[in-house]
Structures are given as C-alpha cells and as structure tokens.
Image: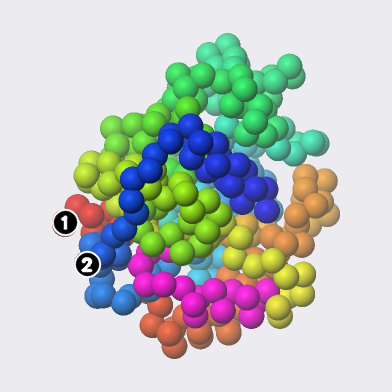
Amino acid sequence: MLLSRCFKRIMLVSMILSGSTSSFGQEATYAERLGWPAGTKVVIFHVDDAGMSHNSNMGAIRAIEDGVATSTSIMMPCSWVPEIAGYVKVHPEVDAGLHLTLTSEWKKYRWGPVAGRTVVPGLVDENGYLWSGVEGVAAHATADEVESEIRAQIDKARSMGIEPTHLDSHMGTCFAPQYIGRYVKVGIEKQIPILIFGGHMQHVGAQAAPFKPIVVTIAQQVWDAGLPVIDDLVTEPTRAKNYEQRKAELIQLLREMKPGITEIIVHCTVQTEVFSHISGSGPTREAELRLMTDPDVKAFIQNEGIVLTTWRELKKRRALK
C-alpha cells in the first residue's frame, strides 16, 4: 500500500540522516507498562481516512459499530468532514483522532491546506492543492509550515466539536526527519496522544530495522511527557487478492503477534460507483471492511483472549502511571 511504501522511504531517510548507533532493547512491553498483565496481546484496529468521502465515513462507522475496529482518524482538509464530525458529536464515545493530512494523492479529487495557501505556500502545488506525495512536501515545505498546518487542523477539528483522541499521519509525512520533531512537539504541548511506537516493533521494525534506536529515543521522549506509546504498527495486514486468503492472513497475523500494544491500520469503505472515480482501491477497502465485521475474525479474537483497546483508553491508563 501507498502508506507502507512511503513509510519505508521515510524510515530509510531518517536512519541515514540521524547516524544513530545506540542499542535497542526494552524488557517490559508498553501493554505491561500501562497495566495489562504480562503476555497480553492488546490491539487497536484503526480505520484511516474518515472524512475523505461519504464512502469512507460509512466504512469507518460500520467497521466500528458492527465490527472489531476500535478507532478512526479524520482527514480535516477533505470535503466530507462535516458528515463524520456530526456523527462524532452524536457518538462522543467513538475514538476519533486526526489523520494529519499534508498530501493530496488522488488525480480527480484534491484538497488544499486548512491553514490556507498564503500561510503555508510550501505545502501547495501550482494549483493550490497539497502535494500529491511525501517527496513533494519534503522538497518544498518548511518545518514551520508543517507545524502551522498541524495546528490549523487541530483548531478546525475543535471548532467543529471534535476533541481528538490522538494524532497520526496520512501517508506518514509527519515522520519525515525534518517534520517529526514538530509532530511530537504539538502532541506533547496539547497532551494529545500521537502515533509512535517504541516496543518490540515485530512488524514495523522489519521495514527498517536500523531505525529502531531512533524511534525508541523518540518514544521515550513521548512517554516521559506523559503520553502513551505502543509496541508495534501494522500498515498492511493482508496482501492476498482472494477474500478467504485475506482472512487467513489476518488470523495468522493475530496468532503470531507478540504480546504488547499493536495498532493494525485498515481502510474501510462502503464501495459505490462514486468511489471508483476517486480511487481504484475500493475493492481492497471493501474487503478490509468485510474483515472487520467477519464473525470468524471476531470469534478468533475472543477465543485467543486478545484485548481490543482505543487511544482514549491508552491515555487514561497513562495518566495513572
């Protein structure tokens, strides 16, 4: 997936620029540090891209209401934010964060920055839209502009009645070496949990193993500031084309997962003809929605004693430690 590819590139660049050679290691998982018994597998099934389209909103809602998804994050620059904002206001228990959006990747459906192009000129292309990829942002936008846009997206969310339970990054742009410090800074300042991992990194660490020491250092900074940290991140839970194979891959992932807190990212969409004009990823997103609501997946989670959690719960547990 696009996020996975972008994330790999960002991790590699960060590793090269940092030159860090510190050792990696941690005895207790973050699940244990947040009060769960040793050996517990704790999972956040996280639905990205709420607010991007009506289809995305319906997919996120259905995955949470009818399935095992526990969290979602909203793309504030996008046109369908009012719909999901209205849903969150009526359902304040929903774990809704912000999918900090600094790129606009689709050809026929684009969006610009919340802060406005005159405030963050380095974030927009010649047509006034956010750059289509991480590389464009990195080549043109300053850290100050990225921070301004992050703050603008948080302010807009709050003005619409959304109190973000967490922050994460669309296409991983906030993890670029010149921006990650601002991402961390804003999260700590506002005491909003941010997606950061610093545990065993069973899956995300395999994408860029040498980067682990750097992430661990950042994760410790976030933890010391009173915010929660997770152990691992899965950006692409399944790769098969056939649905039954997808389900088998997800169940295998859950079976072989190490204890600790793992976020598993999915993109859930109720596919219609309209969404096909945005992206060709509709069938994959529809399959991931089906996985989230599959009785076999639910049963496996229950039988294995896997604990499902939210960013809201992680913050509450961190406050007690």
Q: Which mark is residue 35?
A: 2
Q: Which residues are magenta?
A: 246-263
Residue type at mark 2?
Answer: Gly
What residue is shown at x 68% (from left), y 53% (from top)? 1
Residue 234: say if magenta: no
Judge by depth and name the residue closer to the eye, 127 or 3. Answer: 3
Looking at the image, the residue that sits furthest to the bottom is 303
What residue is shown at x 29% (from left), y 37% (from top)? 188
Label 1: state its secondary structure: loop
Q: State the image quarter where residue 134 is shown.
A: top right
Residue type at mark 1?
Answer: Lys
Residue 248 in the figure: left or right of residue 198: right
Q: Which residue is mark 1?
A: 321
What residue is shown at x 83% (from left), y 54% (from top)? 273
Residue 183: image location, x then y, percent: 41, 34
Label 2: state its secondary structure: loop
What residue is shown at x 70% (from left), y 20% (from top)? 125
Do the residues under discs 2 and 1 have CB atoms within 8 angstroms? yes
Q: Residues within 10 Å of mark 1 (few under 14, many from 20)?
A: few
Residue 230: image location, x then y, percent: 37, 57
